[in-house]
Image: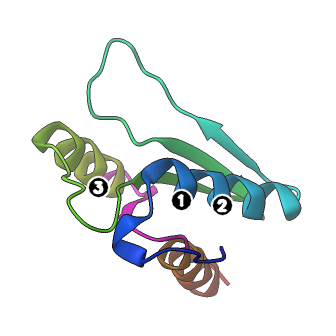
Amino acid sequence: MKQNKPLNETSENEIETAIVKYVEDRKGLALKLEVPSIRGYPDRLVLLDGLIFFIEVKKPKGGVVSPHQDRIIADLQARGYNATVVRTFEEFVAYVGTVKNLSR
């Protein structure tokens, strides 16, 4: 993702857009998650290279993870899923790379 403005001014939408493009360019899916009956589910369900990721996107400065989000992410991780919060596009790419390396 090209940075035309300071990192701390990048919006969650800009980060999500970059993530979607990255995933789709690699023939994956980055689905917007909306679970009406449960608060706190991550923003994106990413299916990439045979792996599943739950990704919550927060802006780099001032983006706050709610207690509901913390609980849901911890629950997903406890069940063996790849779930995390990212604050930059680069953080997402690094996380995916780490998981892919551990899955080999």
Q: Give SS at disc 2.
A: helix
Label 3–label 1 contact, CB within 8 A: no
Q: Residue lying farthest front?
A: 5
Dot 3 or dot 1: first in sequence order is: 1
Residue plotted at (35% across, 59% down): 59
* Position of residue 7 measured from the top left corner of the image (x, y, whole percent): 41, 76
For label 2, the crowd category at 10 Å Cα-Cα, with few meaning under 14, some 14 to 19 and many 20 or more, is: some
Residue 72 screen position, x and y as percent: 26, 42
Q: Is residue 1 above or below residue 55?
A: below
Q: Residue at x 65, y 38 (%)?
A: 31
Looking at marks 3 and 2 on the same chain, the residue that comes earlier in the sequence is marked by: 2
Report the colour scheme. rainbow
Per the rendered image, the range of residues in magenta is 78-89
What's the residue type where badge 3 is placed?
Ala
* 32 to the left or right of 27: left
In reply to whether residue 86 is colored magenta, the answer given is yes
Quadrant into which the N terminus falls: bottom right
Query: Is the C-beta separation of discs 2 and 1 under 8 Å?
Result: yes
Q: Kindly state the secondary structure of the residue where label 1 is placed.
A: helix
For label 1, the residue is 15
Q: Are marks 3 and 2 in contact (CB under 8 Å)?
A: no
Above-or-below relation of 47 to 9: above
Q: Which residue is mark 2?
A: 18
| Residue hosting label 3 | 78
